[in-house]
Amino acid sequence: MKKGAEKHDNVHVFSRNVYSQDRDGVLNEFTENAQLFNKRKNSVYLYHEIISITRSKQLSVEKQQEALFHIVHEYIDHRAKNNLVYGYIRHSAAILGINFLIDAAHTINNNTVPFFHI
């Protein structure tokens, strides 16, 4: 499986810049990182994003997961390279997707890093 992709408790997870492997550790990292954010009214601390692909009958699940992880890697490299990112694969009959959280607290020179839209 690709770098950043692992399996925990039989769930495929994707992470970037997160060092904990259990739920409480991951939550703690996001919470601590949010403390770096300048407090203001209606602040955003996390972004919830989903990337999904339509399931194929011509490709194995493993090949589809590999393709999805490649897409996610490319997206995160442009959207949130230095942010905390953590998510998991969701399966359904029609789609294969990754739900993930991106912290909004990463700053460079006290400026919030801009989004990358594809």
Image (cartoon, rainbow, N blue to C red):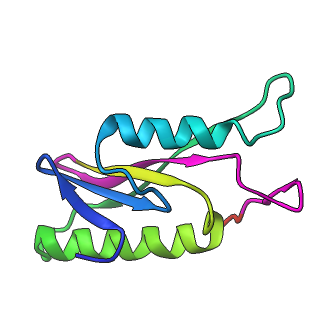
From the viewer's perspective, tell me whether residue 21 is left or right of residue 101.
Answer: left
From this view, report whether residue 55 is shown above or below residue 50.
below
Q: Quadrant of residue 30?
A: top right
Q: Nearer the viewer, residue 17 or 102?
A: 17
Q: Residue at x 10, y 73 (%)?
A: 60
From this view, report whether residue 8 is shown above or below residue 48.
below
The residue sitting at the top extreme is 41
From the viewer's perspective, tell me whether residue 63 is left or right of residue 29.
Answer: left
Q: Position of residue 15 (x, y in %)?
A: 40, 59
Q: Quadrant of the C terminus?
A: bottom right
From the viewer's perspective, tell me whether residue 39 is left or right of residue 64.
Answer: right
Residue 92 on the magenta span: yes
Q: Residue at x 41, y 43 (%)?
A: 26
Where are the magenta residues, as a range? 91-115
From this view, report whether residue 100 is shown above or below residue 31.
below
From this view, report whether residue 23 is shown above or below residue 63.
above
Q: Quadrant of the N terminus?
A: bottom left
Q: Nearer the viewer, residue 55 or 83?
A: 83
Q: Residue at x 79, y 60 (%)?
A: 114
Q: Position of residue 70 (x, y in %)?
A: 38, 77
Q: Residue at x 86, y 27 (%)?
A: 40
